[in-house]
Image (tube, rainbow, N blue to C red):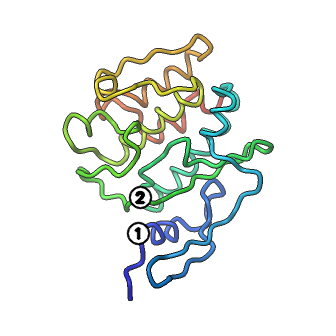
């Protein structure tokens, strides 16, 4: 038969063990495609849509959502799955309850741990080592995308506009961003992968549990 798309394999591997990840309920094959049956969270909208309305989030709201993203990423990592495209558009949020779901594993792979030489994710979230060297490793690239996401949440815009900005790595904040939040974002967006936080560092960071 036809080879099952990797997206389905990854979602089955992640399973139903994390409420912050969209659940694959079923799938079936058509003559020319595959159909995925996913849970449908009521009232949810993607985070980008919410940000376009509100411009940016309070740190309290951002913290609540960011914790859920970390939970989803941690679960994926424990399952050996790399999502590969963490961004506001891939996060469904229920504006009433604040519950969040990570969606779209279409750019994902299994963790390999060695250098990756293809980048299927969203270019604006690509790390500087990919731009400069043409390769990256999964965990530092994930941490970079988490830093980008948190900046977008609390500032309402991207920190960098083009390749030059990404490689230069200069960050500017609005005054309403607390020193603790700025510290976490700067740590995630370290220019060199070795200077970046690890996932466990982010999970233990004072701002996340403030």
Q: How far apart are marks 1 and 2 (CA)?
A: 8 Å
Assign a secondary structure to mark 2: loop
First in sequence: mark 1 or mark 2? 1
In the rendered image, the vertical position of residue 199 relative to residue 53, given as above or below: below
Q: Toward which corner of the image does residue 129 lie, by quadrant?
A: top left
Assign a secondary structure to mark 1: helix
Q: In this view, does 156 lie to the left or right of 135?
A: right
Residue 108: image tag = 2
How many tags in the picture? 2
In the rendered image, the vertical position of residue 128 relative to residue 176, given as above or below: below
Residue beneath disc 1: 6
Which residue occupies the foreground of this view, 15 or 154? 154
* Residue 187, x across and y down, in percent: 42, 27
Please tell me how crowded label 1 is: few (under 14), some (14-19), or many (20+) other residues with Cα within 10 Å.
some
Please tell me how crowded label 2 is: few (under 14), some (14-19), or many (20+) other residues with Cα within 10 Å.
some
Q: Toward which corner of the image does residue 191 lie, by quadrant?
A: top left
| Residue at the image point whose x is 66% and y is 28% from the top | 57
Task: Please identify the residue farthest to the bottom as the structure is shown.
Answer: 1
Task: Please identify the residue farthest to the left as the structure is shown.
Answer: 133
* Residue 36, x across and y down, in percent: 56, 72
Q: Do the residues labelled 1 and 2 touch (CB within 8 Å)?
A: yes
Task: Please identify the residue farthest to the top as the structure is shown.
Answer: 175
* Residue 55, x across and y down, in percent: 64, 26
Q: Toward which corner of the image does residue 150 lie, by quadrant?
A: top right
Q: In this view, does 121 lie to the left or right of 116?
A: right
Quarter of the image that includes the C terminus: top right
* Residue 80, x across and y down, in percent: 42, 61
| Residue at the image point whose x is 47% and y is 62% from the top | 79
């Amino acid at each position: 038969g036809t080879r099952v798309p990797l997206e389905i394999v990854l979602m089955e591997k992640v399973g139903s063990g994390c409420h912050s990840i969209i659940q694959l309920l079923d799938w079936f094959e058509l003559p020319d495609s595959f159909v995925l049956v996913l849970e449908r969270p009521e009232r949810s909208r993607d985070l980008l849509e919410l940000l376009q309305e509100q411009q940016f989030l309070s740190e309290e709201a951002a913290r609540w959502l960011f914790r859920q993203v970390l939970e989803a990423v941690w679960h994926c990592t424990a399952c050996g799955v790399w999502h590969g495209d963490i961004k506001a558009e891939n996060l469904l949020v229920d504006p009433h309850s604040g519950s969040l779901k990570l969606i779209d594993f279409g750019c994902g792979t299994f963790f390999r741990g060695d250098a990756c030489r293809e980048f299927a994710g969203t270019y604006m979230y690509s790390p500087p080592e990919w731009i400069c060297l043409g390769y990256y490793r999964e965990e530092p690239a994930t941490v970079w995308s988490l830093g980008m996401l948190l900046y977008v949440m609390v500032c309402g815009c991207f920190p960098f506009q083009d390749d030059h900005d990404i490689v230069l790595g200069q960050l500017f904040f609005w005054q309403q961003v607390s020193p603790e939040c700025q510290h976490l974002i700067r740590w995630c967006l370290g220019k060199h992968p070795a200077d970046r936080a690890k996932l466990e560092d982010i999970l233990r960071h004072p701002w996340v549990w403030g």
